[in-house]
Amino acid sequence: MPNACLTTRRTFMTQFAAIASPFSCVQIANGGVAWNGQDDSRNDNQRKIVCFFMDGGLSQIDSFDPKPDAPARIRGEFGAINTSAKGVYFSEIWPRLASVADRMTVIRSIRHRHNEHGFALRCMRTLQNNAGRQTPSLGSVVQWQSQSAMPVYVGLNDALDYSGALGANFRPFSLQGPVGKRITAGRSNGNGSEINARLNLLSQLETASTVAQRDIRSQTLIQQQERIGEILRSPVFQRMLNISSVSAETKTRYGATSIGEQVLLARNAVNEGMKFTIVNIPGWDMHTNLFAQCRQKVAAVDSAIAAFVEDLDACGQLESTIVLVMTEFGRSPVIEGTGRGHCPQAMSVLAMGGPVPRGHVLGDTGPNGNESIDIRHEPDDLLASLYKWLQLEWEIMLPGENARLNTAGTVISELEPG
């Protein structure tokens, strides 16, 4: 018979898995994030990344690389509109991001060779063409090298783990786990009752456990629950989830949608010093009913991300924050039935902030949008550029692996930090 107390704790920890990753390793807090009023940072690097990931494969032609002069079977149902960047056009269904195009570089030069979702996801989430299961994502590397016992890598609507060889301690901290959803929905009555109830349960489980029962596994679980307790008690956690004080005007700009709420939470994460924030936005694998689905889905995403960029720029945080809009691959130019197939040879990546040039286009996918033609970059090149800007070490060994962290990429000159 399994130990009843240990089984109860396992059940409890399973329920908490979506709230926080088990940051049980003892490390030095870093990055100026005073989770519980304590900040013994050894690194004052305040550079951050926020990634909006369009899971499923966003069509480049129907977003940020329209082809108005192509035949209808390629052009599709949407027209092209001017953006705030001279000579740059977006699809007409993205007017809000078009209005902030003068603050971004539209990267049309990224390509890879993976035509299947699983491999393409791993490639673009790790930004390495040859990524294997042990290859960690950039966010996991940021968490690892931050030397922080508490999260600086957070995720919204993101259940995937690309921590690789670094292990689950370095997966993203899920900002909207069960407790987070209750708090943002107002069910904690604004007085922390939801957090207190969870903390009381943690305390009861700890009291019920005896020293004799604490084998290695239960010790690990105890360390995990202690870390979760620190997170739940922290003013940082509660402030990141607080959108109740956001003005009605701001909520309108971001949109009264679940995407709008998630992007507001991403703004909170930046304000609280999180170093890598990923917002996963699923539903872009549009093999059928592409145009109807885009009409239904795009407006909420377009409004929220544009409002986020405007706010970061207005408060001066865009200089220290790179914002990325990415996907796993583009879509095939020729419309197949009512949708488009997969096309890893062409995609659009939006990059804003930090050293990224404003109002710039990098690369060209030709008249039909089927492949990058004049300049070509691997995902690894974007990774090398981000590593350099974040001042990460990459010529180091992965823990427990006979392999180096380094990327095969070359820094993209247009994104070279000044």
Image (tube, grey):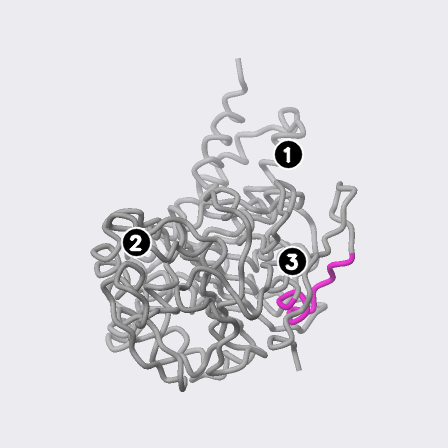
Residue at 66% x, 27% y: name it: 215
Report the mark closest to the observer, 1 or 3: 3
40 sits left or right of 82 in the view? right
Q: Position of residue 278 (x, y in %)?
A: 48, 58
The residues tagged by marks 1 and 3 sit, at their Cα atoms, a distance apart of 21 Å
What is the three-letter code of the residue carrying label 3?
A: Ser
| Residue hosting label 2 | 335
Given contact means CB atoms under 8 Å apart, are the residues at marks 1 and 3 in contact? no
Which sits earlier in the primary sequence, circle 2 or circle 3?
3
Residue 178 left/right relative to 328? left
Query: What separation in Å lies between label 2 and label 1 (alpha carbons)?
Result: 56 Å
Front position in the image: 276 or 18: 276
> Mark 2–mark 1 contact, CB under 8 Å?
no
**Residue with the mark numbered 1:** 219
- Closer to the chain start, of discs 1 and 3, is 3
Q: As shown in the figure, which amino acid type bears the numbered disc 1?
A: Gln
Q: Earlier in the sequence, mark 2 or mark 1?
A: 1
**For the residue labelled by badge 3, is the local secondary structure a helix, a strand or a loop?**
loop
Residue at the spot 42% in from the left edge and 55% down from the top edge: 280
The circle drawn on residue 44 is none
Under mark 2, the amino acid is: Ile
191 or 306: nearer the viewer: 306
Can residue 303 be seen here? The reply is no
Task: Find residue 414 and report its horizontal and vertical position in percent.
Answer: 60, 77
Query: In the image, which residues are magenta?
Result: 385-395
Residue bearing the label numbered 3: 148
Picture coordinates of residue 230 (x, y %)? 54, 52
Quadrant of res 388: bottom right
C-alpha distance separating marks 2 and 3: 48 Å
Residue situated in front as seen by the camera: 173 or 404: 404
